[in-house]
């Protein structure tokens, strides 16, 4: 039983906590108060207007009586006065008519039993005029009226006192002995019923209250319907959407197409749920593929680490190669010079074939010394011993100069060269000599990879902040096992007597020194493409 009671209490609390319920109750209370005030003011104004009209009717009746009986009173025709008063007294709404003389004696009345009856000066009819400070001619119209209860039907009645003033005709008439100094000869008291007025006020009060209640109910009903459709229904959908999202249905959409504030809230909610759903799916995807992503990131870090190690190797080897190159360069130059000199002398003095073998040995020494010199030269280039000076240069001119320098190599190997760039000036900040060395090394490398001839293509593609240069050959390509190591120093795919393994390492160092990038864009058995990206401004 306690559980059921608490459940009912919770349902009531939930009902009264609804925004629509509170709005309807608030509007109904405010409307009831406004209509109650309006009803009170209307009834009060109606009562005042009807009372004023009744009072005016009583004044008019009193004046009619005065004017109708004036002539008969001047002639002292009492029967005529009685007849007039009795005739007017039969009019609807008139309770009674009295005429008091100045002594308080009832001279005329619609009730014949009251005639010649003297009333007390303390009577309600006389009290207003006979106060110590009261004079009937000085009384205001409001002080001349009184309200009392009609003894016949126990209803409200109104009494009006109208003074009969001593006019000139009255004081000079033969039948009267009134002195001119007397201002008031008597009082006309007209009593009218307020029953019809009170009944009309009560009827109008009931009808006004009834209509006010009906108007309150109708307007409250329409307001409730309006709030139900415009406010409560959208709020229900919004609340349902919030509950669905709370349950995990992040892709839930609220179907509200209105353009008001609630419609805007619904659209914002739909955007929020869509973003939450996308974020949840992304988190779920990360969770499900975490191992794969960790492995991918590990591979990326491994590659970066390998590059760092390679850069450190290059830096260490650069210092070593500079020292070795200086130490070897001088004796090698001497050996080469003297071996060539001896070979020349022997050739001049040769009379028979006895020196032929010696000349071959000397030529072998000269060739090997020349090869050692080339190694030393590559070491010097690799070490970057000299400090580069960067200036603004035209990359197109550098490329054209390189093509001119290797022209005889192209002819000897039966290789054609195509240049694909249409701008005559492609300005970059660089060391022209080092860029030339790198390009010549790449072109020589391409020539050596094409023993059967073919075509080398050079592309220049200016971009917003950099220049992309591609060198494509039609050689034998690079093996997959060699591709990760081609930029490492002393790593060569050529025979031991044909390469030092420093060519591409030197190129890599020059491009990196220019804050650029060099990569193998593609390679296959039908050719290789190297891509070099150089910034326009360092």
Image (cartoon, rainbow, N blue to C red):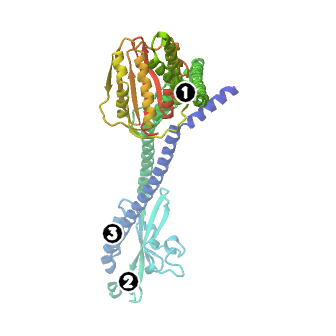
Q: Is residue 134 above or below residue 19?
A: below
* Quarter of the image with the N terminus in it: top right
Q: Farthest residue in the right direction? A: 2
| Spatial CA span between label 1 and label 3 | 170 Å
Q: Is residue 277 visible?
A: no
Mark 2 burial class by Cα count in 10 Å: few <14, some 14-19, many 20+ = some
Q: Is residue 11 above or below residue 105?
A: above
Q: Nearer the viewer, mark 2 or mark 1?
A: 1
Q: Relative to 180, is 150 on the left or the right?
A: right
Mark 3 burial class by Cα count in 10 Å: few <14, some 14-19, many 20+ = some
Name the mark on residue 334: 1
Q: Position of residue 457 (x, y in %)?
A: 35, 22
Q: Are marks 2 and 1 in contact (CB under 8 Å)?
A: no
| Spatial CA span between label 2 and label 3 | 21 Å
Disc 2, SS: loop
Q: Are marks 1 and 3 in contact (CB under 8 Å)?
A: no
Q: Nearer the viewer, mark 2 or mark 3?
A: 2
Q: Please report whichever mark, 2 or 3, sits nearer to the chain's N-terminal start.
A: 3
Q: Position of residue 170 (x, y in %)?
A: 34, 84
Q: Is residue 252 visible?
A: yes
Disc 3, SS: helix
Name the mark on residue 84: 3
Q: Position of residue 234 (x, y in %)?
A: 46, 33
Q: Is residue 430 above or below residue 132?
A: above
Q: Nearer the viewer, residue 103 or 244?
A: 244
Q: So how many labels did they put on this image? A: 3
Disc 1, SS: helix
Name the mark on residue 166: 2
Q: Position of residue 358 (x, y in %)?
A: 51, 14
Mark 1 burial class by Cα count in 10 Å: few <14, some 14-19, many 20+ = few
């Amino acid at each position: 039983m306690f559980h059921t009671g608490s459940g009912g209490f919770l349902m009531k609390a939930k009902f009264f906590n609804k925004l629509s319920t509170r709005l309807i109750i608030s509007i109904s209370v405010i409307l009831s108060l406004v209509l109650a005030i309006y009803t009170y003011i209307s009834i009060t104004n109606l009562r005042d207007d009807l009372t004023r009209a009744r009072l005016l009717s009583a004044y008019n009746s009193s004046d009619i009586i005065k004017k109708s009986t004036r002539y008969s009173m001047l002639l002292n025709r009492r029967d005529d006065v009685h007849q007039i008063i009795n005739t007017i007294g039969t009019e609807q709404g008139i309770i009674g008519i009295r005429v008091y003389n100045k002594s308080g004696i009832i001279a005329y009345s619609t009730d014949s039993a009251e005639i010649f009856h003297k009333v007390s000066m303390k009577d309600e009819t006389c009290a207003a005029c006979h106060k110590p400070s009261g004079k009937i001619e000085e009384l205001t119209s409001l002080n001349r009226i009184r309200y009392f209860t009609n003894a016949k039907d126990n209803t409200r009645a109104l009494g009006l006192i109208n003074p009969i003033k001593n006019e000139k005709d009255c004081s000079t008439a033969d039948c009267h002995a009134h002195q001119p100094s007397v201002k008031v000869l008597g009082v006309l008291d007209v009593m009218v019923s307020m029953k019809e007025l009170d009944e009309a006020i009560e009827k109008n009060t009931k009808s006004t209250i009834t209509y006010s209640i009906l108007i309150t109910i109708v307007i409250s009903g329409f307001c409730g319907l309006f709030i139900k459709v415009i406010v409560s229904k959208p709020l229900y959908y919004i609340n349902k959407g919030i509950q669905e999202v709370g349950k995990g249905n992040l892709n839930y959409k609220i179907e509200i197409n209105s353009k008001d504030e609630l419609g805007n809230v619904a659209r914002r909610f739909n955007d929020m749920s869509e973003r939450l759903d996308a974020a949840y799916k992304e988190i779920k995807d990360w969770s499900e593929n975490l191992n794969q992503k960790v492995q991918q990131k590990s591979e990326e870090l491994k590659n970066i680490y390998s590059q760092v190690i390679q850069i450190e190797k290059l830096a260490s080897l650069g210092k070593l190669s500079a020292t070795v190159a200086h130490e070897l360069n001088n004796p090698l130059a001497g050996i080469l010079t003297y071996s060539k000199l001896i070979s020349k002398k022997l050739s001049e003095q040769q009379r028979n074939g006895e020196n032929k073998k010696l000349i071959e040995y000397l030529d072998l020494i000269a060739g090997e010394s020349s090869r050692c010199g080339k190694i030393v030269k590559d070491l010097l280039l690799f070490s970057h011993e000299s400090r580069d000076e960067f200036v603004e240069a035209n990359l197109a001119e550098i490329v054209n100069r390189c093509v001119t320098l290797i022209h005889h190599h192209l002819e000897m190997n039966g290789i054609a060269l195509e240049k694909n760039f249409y701008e005559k000036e492609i300005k970059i900040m660089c060391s022209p000599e080092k860029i030339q060395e790198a390009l010549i090394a790449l072109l020589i490398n391409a020539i050596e990879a094409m023993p059967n001839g073919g075509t080398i293509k050079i592309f220049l593609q200016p971009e917003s902040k950099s220049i992309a240069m591609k060198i494509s050959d039609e050689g034998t390509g690079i093996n997959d096992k060699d591709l990760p190591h081609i930029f490492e120093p002393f790593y060569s795919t050529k025979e031991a007597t044909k390469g030092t393994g420093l060519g591409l390492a030197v190129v890599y160092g020059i491009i990196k020194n220019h804050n650029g990038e060099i990569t193998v864009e593609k390679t296959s058995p039908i050719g290789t493409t190297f891509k070099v990206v150089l910034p326009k401004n360092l």
